[in-house]
Image (cartoon, rainbow, N blue to C red):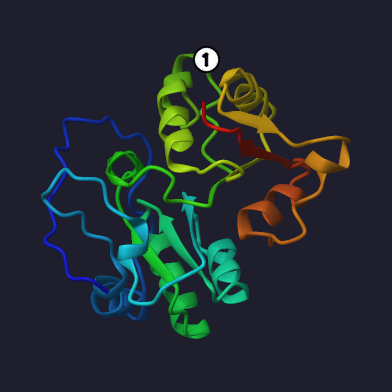
């Protein structure tokens, strides 16, 4: 991986909501954070120029995909294992989730995955236009209360960034088990001129995409009686 000088983003520039760390980690997980994470971590250079996300990897890949908030890492790890010709960037601020993904990287011996363990809103503006083939947002925090709506990731500003990063035909996938967030997502994404919803029939949003895998969170949601919704949007032609 290319060695880059890291720069710490200004913590006052963006407001972050949510947890960054959970219960105490076991020694094995701590060891992975100390030994493996530095080799996979994306460190943004001091330059403000746009970065080709392909440059984060040693090898050349057919395309680069981004997963925002990978949770415990089951989904992105399975995707990386099933698609060795694709480079994957996983973003997650929750330390316990990062440690969990590192375990999968070690077990599967993944060579096509990099990690950005900070707020993805610092990363997105730094990437070059059209540099990502697919962006996944699996089961984001719904922030269901009206007064917390501004905390939701789906927003006109973030959608503008995602639209910039996806080429024509690129995919934006969102999954949620919360009706408020599903309605919010459809309202905002369908109002954005850069995205087209591909659904033709109910099974298109009721059934997880065939090339995807279930995460631990999805399985827990189903066990608790919550019904996931899978929304796939495609980047429209640029004008």
Residue 137 in view, yes or no: yes
Disc 1: CA contacts within 10 A as few (<14), some (14-19) or many (>=20):
few
- Residue 227 position within the rendered picture, expressed as x and y whole percent measured from the top left: 77, 41
In the picture as drawn, the residue positioned furthest to the top comes out as 147
Q: Observer-nearest residue: 190 or 165? A: 165
Whether residue 152 appears in this view of the structure is: no
Q: Is residue 195 above or below residue 193?
A: below
Q: Look at the picture and state if 127 lies above or below 184.
A: below
Point out residue 203 in the picture as x, y percentages from the top left corner. Answer: 87, 42
Residue 83 falls in image quadrant? bottom right
Vertical order, 79 against 222 (above or below): below
Give the residue at x 43% y 58%: 90
Q: Is residue 45 left or right of residue 22?
A: left
Of residue 186 and residue 17, the one placed in the foreground of this image is 186
Decide which of 61, 74 is in the foreground and name it: 61
Q: Is residue 125 left or right of residue 211?
A: left
Residue depicted at 78% across the width and 40% down the height: 205
Residue 164 image-quadrant placement: top left
Q: Residue at x 55, y 76 (%)?
A: 84
The one nearer the camera, 191 or 35, is: 191
Question: What residue is pinned by disc 1?
Answer: 146
As helix, strand or loop, the secondary structure at mark 1 comes to: helix
Q: Position of residue 162 (x, y in %)?
A: 46, 37
Count of numbered circles in the view: 1
The residue furthest front is 239
Residue at 62% from the left image edge and 60% from the top image edge: 216
**x and y, in percent, of residue 143 in the image:** 51, 28
Quarter the N terminus occupies:
bottom left
């Amino acid at each position: 991986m290319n060695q880059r000088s890291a720069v710490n983003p200004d913590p006052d520039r963006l407001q972050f909501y949510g947890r960054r760390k959970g219960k105490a980690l076991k020694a094995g997980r701590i060891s992975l954070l100390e030994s493996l994470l530095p080799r996979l971590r994306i460190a943004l250079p001091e330059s403000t120029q746009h970065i080709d996300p392909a440059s984060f990897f040693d090898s050349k890949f057919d395309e680069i995909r981004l997963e925002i908030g990978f949770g415990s890492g089951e989904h992105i790890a399975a995707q990386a294992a099933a698609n060795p010709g694709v480079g994957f960037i996983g973003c997650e601020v929750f330390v316990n989730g990062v440690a969990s993904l590192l375990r999968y990287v070690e077990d599967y011996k993944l060579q096509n995955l990099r990690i950005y363990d900070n707020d993805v809103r610092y990363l997105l503006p730094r990437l070059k236009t059209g540099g990502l083939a697919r962006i996944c947002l699996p089961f984001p925090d719904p922030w269901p209360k009206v007064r917390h709506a501004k905390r939701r990731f789906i927003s006109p500003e973030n959608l503008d960034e995602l639209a910039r990063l996806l080429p024509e035909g690129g995919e934006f996938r969102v999954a949620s088990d919360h009706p408020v967030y599903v309605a919010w997502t459809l309202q905002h994404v369908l109002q954005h001129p850069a995205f087209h919803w591909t659904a033709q029939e109910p099974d298109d949003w009721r059934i997880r995409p065939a090339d995807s895998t279930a995460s631990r969170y999805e399985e827990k949601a189903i066990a608790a009686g919550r019904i996931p919704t899978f929304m796939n949007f495609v980047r429209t032609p640029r004008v």
